[in-house]
Image: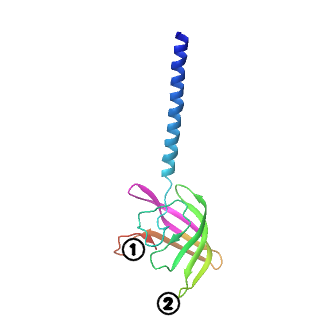
């Protein structure tokens, strides 16, 4: 009788240990996932600046003028410090009542991590292409006396 009772206690303890280790593993995975920075500014149409942060968004929008955006972004790398991929840059080439765009494939790199209300996010973005040679760095921040951040 004692043997069965002892075996039952041991099995109960072993089951508890296995369950706890699974909980710790799940917690560690969730913790590490939250350390990956988000990208803000990936939704157009006046999306609030600090909402709708995304990991590996498919598009990036600049300001509110509609003069450029990046679509069809394919991310090849995304970790706690940097992200990179490529996408289609749509850049407006005429003004007034004209809405013509030039579309080119560009490399996209995200870097320099900031923290806003405890959430990590990328604050810098570099776009580049080899022909014609093109490289520009953008910042996700406010501009002038403004209070709403955007890519500029």
In percent of width and height, residue 13 lies at 51, 24
> Which residue lies most toward the top here?
1
Residue at image mark 2? 97
SS under mark 1: loop
Magenta stretch secondary structure, dominant:
strand
| The stretch drawn in magenta includes residue 92 | no
Residue at image mark 1? 143
Residue range of the region highlighted in magenta in the rendering: 107-125
* Left or right: 105 in relation to 53: right
Q: Earlier in the sequence, mark 2 or mark 1?
A: 2
In percent of width and height, residue 56 lies at 55, 61
Q: Residue at x 57, y 71 (%)?
A: 71
Q: Of residues 77 and 66, which is closer to you in this image?
A: 66
Q: Which of the two marks, 2 or 1, is nearer to us in this view?
A: 2
* Left or right: 97 in relation to 116: right
Cα distance between the residues tagged 2 and 1:
27 Å
């Amino acid at each position: 009788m004692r043997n069965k009772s002892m075996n039952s206690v041991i099995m109960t303890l072993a089951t508890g240990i296995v369950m706890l280790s699974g909980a710790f593993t799940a917690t560690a995975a969730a913790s590490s996932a939250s350390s990956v920075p988000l990208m803000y500014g990936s939704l157009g149409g006046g999306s609030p600046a600090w909402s709708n942060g995304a990991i590996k968004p498919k598009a990036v929008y600049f300001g509110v003028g509609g003069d450029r955006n990046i679509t069809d972004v394919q991310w090849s790398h995304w970790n706690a410090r940097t992200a990179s991929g490529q996408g289609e840059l749509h850049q407006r080439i005429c003004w007034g009542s004209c809405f013509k765009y030039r579309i080119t494939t560009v490399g996209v790199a995200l870097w320099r991590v900031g923290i806003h209300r405890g959430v990590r996010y990328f604050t810098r973005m570099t776009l580049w292409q080899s022909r014609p040679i093109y490289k520009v760095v953008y910042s996700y921040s406010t501009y002038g006396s403004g209070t709403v951040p955007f890519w500029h």
